[in-house]
Amino acid sequence: MDFLEKQVGRVDISEAQVVTKATVVAAERLGLNARSLASVLGVSEASVSRMKRLDHLLEKGTKPFELALLLIRLFRSLDAITGGDEGVARKWLRNTNTALGGIPADRISTITGLTDVLAYLDARRALV
């Protein structure tokens, strides 16, 4: 058993399950629909639908898993900056940001854009 896997009662919870569930929750709280999440992770919309039921898990070492970790980090940073106000976070994600050169929700559909948005949020979070 991997050191990140934990036995909870009689249910084994794996790292893949935790990351998959955290990704789905982060996307929902950010107001990202299945198409947007699929675009960020580089998977199909059908895979996202299966992820919501935990029928499809993001496996460690794959590109979708790594991108999911970045999306979770983005959510955590934005959540900290907005004080947990989902409405403010959703508006920020959907409005043009001149420093980022576009709308963050559009930018995160590419790896470069996702890392740019994360760098911006990390810099802003350092000021909080």
Image: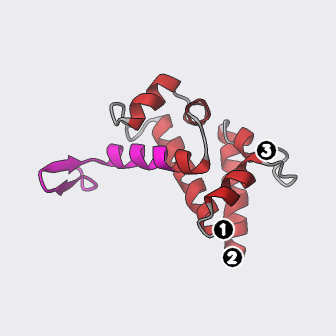
**Which residue, given by chain and number where applicable, does mark 2 sit on?**
128
Cα separation between marks 2 and 3: 22 Å
Can residue 70 be seen?
A: no
Q: Quadrant of residue 56?
A: top left
Give the extent of the magenta segment: 1-25
Q: Amino acid at mark 3?
A: Ile
Q: Quadrant of residue 7?
A: bottom left
The secondary structure type at the circle numbered 3 is: loop
Q: Earlier in the sequence, mark 2 or mark 1?
A: 1
**Which residue, given by chain and number where applicable, does mark 1 sit on?**
81
Residue 66: percent from left, percent from top: 49, 43
The secondary structure type at the circle numbered 1 is: helix
Relative to residue 48, is residue 123 drawn left or right?
Answer: right
Q: Amino acid at mark 2?
A: Val
Query: Label 2 neighbourhood size at 10 Å, few (<14), some (14-19), many (20+)?
Result: few
The numbered dot on residue 45 is none
**Which residue, given by chain and number where applicable, does mark 3 sit on?**
103
Residue 84: percent from left, percent from top: 59, 66
**Residue contact between numbered discs 2 and 1, judged by CB atoms under 8 Å:** yes
The secondary structure type at the circle numbered 2 is: loop
